[in-house]
Amino acid sequence: MKGNYVLGIEGTAWNLSAAIVDEKNVVIEKTATYKPRAGGIHPREAAQHHASHITALLKNVLCYASENNITLDAVAFAQGPGLGPCLRITATAARTISLSCNIPLIGVNHCIAHIEVGIWKTEAEDPVTLYVSGANSQVLAYRGKKYRIFGETMDIGIGNALDKFARAAGLEHPGGPKIEKLARSATHYVQLPYTVKGMDFSFSGLTTACMESLKNGELLPDVCYSFQETAFAMLVEVTERAVAHTGKKEVLLAGGVGANKRLVSMLQIMCDERGIDFYAPEKRYMGDNGTMIAHLGYLQYKAGDTTPIEKSAVNPNFRPDEVTITWKHPQHRQ
Ligand code: AMP
Ligand code: MG
């Protein structure tokens, strides 16, 4: 088949996922999801999960490609940020495919992949992005060949904060969706600490305060509601200030917590009031997925931005603002 095809492999944390994309379409995506037996994500167990599923998963995707006469042009993998043991499994698989098929290897930044898939799958062109996932919470925008971080969490990501509180309240992992559901039957707001310092925010004190409120007799739905209202207000405030500072006319929501309807509606209200556009891709592109890695791999491949094996070591703390954007961005045309 004509066109360029890139395979992308994601496995930074709970979701092992591989996809092939071309310029416009997702050709195939296959996923194997790790579910902790108890508690939260255990890095070694998650890596064990990925190791035991990756061969079958990739076989499935590669057989589909060969049955449909699709020849891969490159293989991309998430080089970080993420859990070290998990990152190493997918990096090893990607290096193996690169060497055995003699195609370029492309290490991509997982956070930037969230942004780029959002831009690809919505009408957004040059947004301020609120990226809210399990481990990460950042407000980013493009400026001068980089995705700059305008604000970020000073401790844990909002998803992990929600999951941690949910676990303490006896709810199963992942807790975010359960908290959202319980919040709908709340009757009142419980006072909680609101922590925004400069352009950064913090969630671990909020999680502890929620646990204390439960111990003090507040009802779970009320605490869930108050947690969401407080944390999301912090995120929306910083996003709005990044919009005001950069003068951008779009906001994009990315990351697994972006599935939350209350967060979506708060961002929509802020954008409506400012007269700017709000975009959120469909849910399958919000949480971690192979398509986003394949798509960013595709952009980097077209820009000739590939990764030699000797520079393909994983980086659990890989920050998006370390990456120089080599591919076409709407601002490059200015
Ligand atoms: P990611 O790391 O981007 O795949 O996102 C995973 C995180 O998203 C987990 O912490 C989940 O609890 C959280 N999450 C998923 N759905 C929701 C939801 N509806 N509301 C809040 N958090 C959610
Ligand atoms: Mg993510």
Image (cartoon, rainbow, N blue to C red):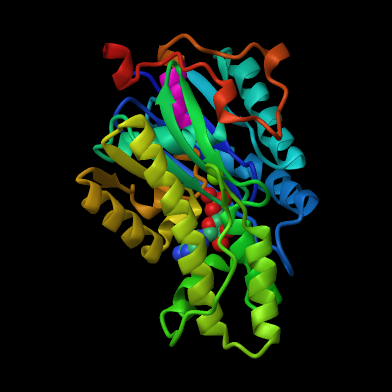
Seen from the viewer's position, the closer of residues 47 and 196 is 196
Apparent side of residue 239 relative to residue 17 in the rendered image (left or right):
left
Apparent side of residue 281 relative to residue 186 in the rendered image (left or right):
left
Seen from the viewer's position, the closer of residues 166 and 283 is 166
Q: For residue 38, what is the image quadrant?
A: bottom right
Q: In which quarter of the image is the C terminus?
A: top left
Q: For residue 260, what is the image quadrant?
A: bottom left
What's the magenta region? 294-300
Q: For residue 200, what is the image quadrant?
A: top right
Q: Residue 91: x, y in percent?
A: 67, 29
Whether 298 is among the magenta residues is: yes
At x 55%, y 76%, the residue is: 191
Seen from the viewer's position, the closer of residues 197 and 303 is 197
At x 46%, y 78%, the residue is: 183
> Quick check: 329 above or below 31?
above
Seen from the viewer's position, the closer of residues 265 and 280 is 265
Is any atom of residue 176 visible in this view? yes
